[in-house]
Structures are given as C-alpha cells and as structure tokens.
Image (cartoon, grey):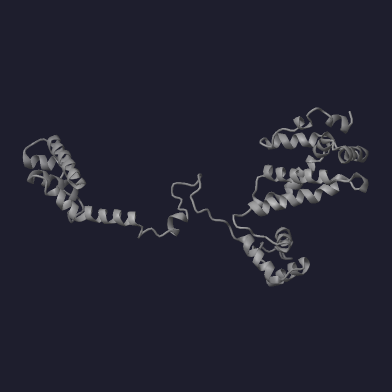
Amino acid sequence: MNATTALSVRDPWALVPSLGNLDAYISAVNRLPMLTQTEEVELGRRLRDHGDLQAAGQLVLSHLRLVVSVSRQYLGYGLPQGDLIQEGNVGLMKAVKRFDPEQGVRLVSYALHWIKAEIHEYILKNWRMVKVATTKAQRKLFFNLRSMKQGLKADADGETYRSTLTPAEVATVARELNVKPDEVVEMETRLAGGDVALEPQADDGEESYAPIAYLADDRHEPTRALESRHRDWLAGDGIHHALEVLDARSRRIVEERWLKVNDDASGGMTLHELAAEYGVSAERIRQIEVAALKKMRKALEV
C-alpha cells in the first residue's frame, strides 16, 4: 500500500488521535506514511485545480510529523507542547492552501516558514502577560537572543554560565542581528523579567502571600474603617458595658477566667479555685461562666 492509498480513507483524520493524549498523537503521526514527490505534486494539483479537500487532508496528514519536530525546538518557553503543535498545524494548513506544485519545491520546505510563523505568534501572545516583542525587529531579536546567548554564556576556560551578557557580548549580538546595542539590553531585560500573579494560585501553599494582599491600601475603605472602629470599642468600652449587666459573682468569674493576667503570666483563677471559694462544684462555676458570657454577647449586640 503506497502513501496515497494509506491516506485515502473516508475520514483520514481518524488515523490521528486527539492532542489530549500527546504521546499517542505523536506516535500516530510518526507512523503515517510520507508522500513521494510525484504523489505530492498530484495531490497539490487536485487541490489547486478542483478544490479537492481530501487531497488537502492527505497533504496535511503526511506532514504532521514535521510540526511535531518543529514544536520541540520551542519547549524552552514553558508552553504546553500540545498547544505548540496545534498552532503549528494551523500554519501547516495555511501552507497547504497556498502550495503551488509547479514551483518544483517540496511542501516540507515551503511549510516550514508557515509552521514557525504560527508558533512564533502563539509564543509572543502567551509567553508573558505583557508583550515582550511587538515590532518585526523585536520579534527577530526575541527568538535569536535566547539561542545566541547559549553560545556566549561559557567562557573559553569553562567558567560558570552567566545569566547576563557583558558589554562585549551585547555588541556582538547587536552586530550579528543588525540592531542597536541598547535594543539588545532592553530585550534581555524583558526576557529576564518574570510575571507575578496578583492572585494566589490554586496550587500555592497555605502560607502563600500574593501581591494582591499588599498592593491595595484598604485602610481607609469605609467598611474597613467601621469594622476597625467597632473592634476598638469592643476591646475597650464595650467590655466594660457588657460586664455591667452581670451580677457581682458572675462578673468576678468572667474577669478571673478571661480578663485577668497576673504578673507571673499564669492568668486568673481556675474553675476549681473559684469553686472552692464560693463553696460550689467546678461544674456549677462553668455553668455560671457560660450564662454570663451569653449575657455579655447579648449586651454587645445592642
């Protein structure tokens, strides 16, 4: 069975699993047969002259492995390979649509430009929240600076890699890419800077402290101000007001159990000490304490 026959099924895309299972997808596209130049030209003519979508599908399927190969070159940007492949496939389809079989150029050479262009566009839009490259010159610098730095990082004597370029290295990069040195420095700064999430991430630990917690000054926000004022009242005049609704015994029990701090930091009297003083059980002292606290809470709600 030749390549054309293998791909000429009713639904050629049934041969390729979803990108949701990346390993299965890559394994499947690597098993798809490649087209000979004669088959490629024949399919290209069918698409160009008759709008044959099945021919277009066969051209795309036979080059999916190319997209996978190109996507591996951009894994260092921290983006999912599945997304890179998906964008590359869009570029491949654009190349197939514009492919002229009479030019004598193989589709693989023609499609490479379109695949990389779509992947580049995706990376520039999604690598950072803030765009790092907007002009054509900046895009060229963005994708070349990373690879060029790898060749400049190590000194001849094998010293440790450096994260920033020296002035001499900046001049070298600027000269080879035909840009100004200050543009190289600016792009390197953009590449070195990282995004900071304002909100805490779902997988952050309990101790995470996202910038949103300290960037906003809400001290003078009306609701916060009222809450703060109410807390201050409760800690001062509110407590005295609540204690006044209690009888003498209840008040002393609450003060000894909750409000009194001795010099030796041992706190007030225990339930058993108060029980011995009033000649009742410790459980009775606890009941009086619970009732007194309920009265105080009710008084504070007024």
Q: Residue at x 15, y 46 (%)?
A: 254
Q: Position of residue 271 (x, y in %)?
A: 15, 41
The answer to whether residue 205 is above or below residue 189 is above
Residue 85 versus residue 156: which sits nearer the camera?
Answer: 85
The residue shown at (92%, 48%) is 103
Q: Nearer the viewer, residue 289 or 101?
A: 101
Q: Residue furthest front?
A: 50
Residue 13 at x, y percent in the picture: 76, 32
What residue is drawn where x is 51% and y is 47%? 201
How many numbered callouts?
0
In front here: 169 or 226?
226
Q: Quadrant of the N terminus?
A: top right
Q: Is residue 122 above or below residue 21?
A: below
- Pinpoint residue 38: horizontal percent, then vertical percent: 93, 39
175 displayed left or right of 197: right
The picture places residue 29, in percent across and down from the top left corner, at 77, 36
Residue, far left:
279
Is 6 left or right of 148, judged from the image as shown? right
